[in-house]
Image (cartoon, rainbow, N blue to C red):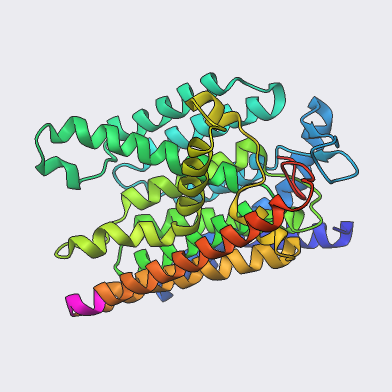
Amino acid sequence: MSKRRILSLIALSALVVLMPAGGFSAWTWVEGLRWLYLFLISFLSCAILSPAASWLAWRIGAVDRPDHRKVHAAPVPRIGGAAVYAAFMLTIFRNQQFAPGIKGVLLGGTMIFVLGFIDDWKQLSARTRLFWQVAASLTVTMLGLQLTFPLSLPYGSALSVILSTLWLVGITNAFNFMDGIDGLASSMGAVCSLLFLGLGWNSSQFALSFMSAALAGACAGFLIANWHPAKAFLGDSGSTFIGFMLGCLAIYGGWATDDPAVAFSTPLLVLGIPIFDILYTTVSRVRNGQVKSVKEWLEYAGRDHFHHRLMHLGLGVRQTVWFIVLLNVCLGLGAWTMRRTVTSVGTWLLLAQSVMVFAIVVVLMLLGRDIADNRPGRGSRVGDGG
């Protein structure tokens, strides 16, 4: 990015963020565009802070260097997550709207970011990463953000804490596993956040919408540096933070009050591709004997993810990102439509449509595997080292 463009972004960001009361900020409240205001603050802040995060990465040695497993020819900074985290937090505190449960989400998200930052810098063990991911998830659940459907079951409170923790740890790692090519995790973070934003705003869930707008803006802003060929990587500090926050948004939202099928399936569809990818690869690796413990699951670096399989089929990095994003948008729009469907038949037809989408993904995964099995591998990551 040229210095002139960076200076222009700085000037525009300062204009938006520092606008006195009664200006653009107040206008967005009146016109019902507060989400756009927050998105712009987060987007511009992350775009400005990304070069600073890269500078810090060079200073402390948090740099992804080329080796036989990776295809980038030059070292690339890998703590871009610092810019995403800082932009998100700046936006949330600028908005000054702290509904019940948000402080717990911010605390848990901070724990996940710090954990990822240290891992990018010093390389932590899988056991340490898992311990602190569980600790951050328990922090969120103990401060009031839990899945509600288990509460009506025997031992409902304990079951809710356990399932909420498993959900948050799972989504956190699902996004970490997706961070295998330039721009994919950032793009998916932006798209999933925007879907949650639309669903929340449409149902007057403003706290959910504000957090979603802040996360979407941060992810989109980082794409300036992370789009292929990437000048900076998210690193674990970014990919795990994005995944953790999306997992929290899924629990935070109220998706339906009188239709369990819609309430249960809405967040699953919005996060459909990351969930499918982690489940498919986990089952495949366990069945093939490649993974025999949680430690091995966290540390395994393979080329069997959905994005790898699409690239085996001949798609380039950018084409792969666009294809996965479009698939997830289709699933998200299905979730949006389900909330407006007045008949149970319509709901189940939309769910059947989503199952067909996943069936297409399975076929593509199998085709990509067959092609990969018939030619030598080129490493575990393509276009992104962090």
> Eyeballing the image, is 367 above or below 287?
below
Query: Which quadrant would the C terminus be assigned to in this image?
Result: top right
The location of residue 20, given as percent across then percent down, is 55, 59
The residue lying at 77 percent from left, 42 percent from top is 379
The residue lying at 56 percent from left, 71 percent from top is 326
Viewer-nearest residue: 195 or 70: 70
The location of residue 273, given as percent across then percent down, is 49, 58
Visible residue check, residue 44 = no
Q: Quadrant of residue 139?
A: top left
Q: Quadrant of residue 234?
A: top right
Q: Quadrant of residue 187?
A: bottom right
Viewer-nearest residue: 103 or 309: 309
> Eyeballing the image, is 70 above or below 314?
above
Q: How many marks?
A: 0
The residue lying at 39 percent from left, 69 percent from top is 354
Query: Which quadrant would the N terminus be assigned to in this image?
Result: bottom right
The location of residue 284, given as percent across then percent down, is 51, 43
The residue lying at 25 percent from left, 60 percent from top is 263
In the image: residue 140, left or right of residue 188: left
Magenta stretch, overall SS: helix
Numbered range of the magenta stretch = 343-347
The location of residue 151, given as percent across then percent down, is 14, 41
The answer to if 345 sits in the magenta stretch is yes
In the image: residue 354, left or right of residue 219: left
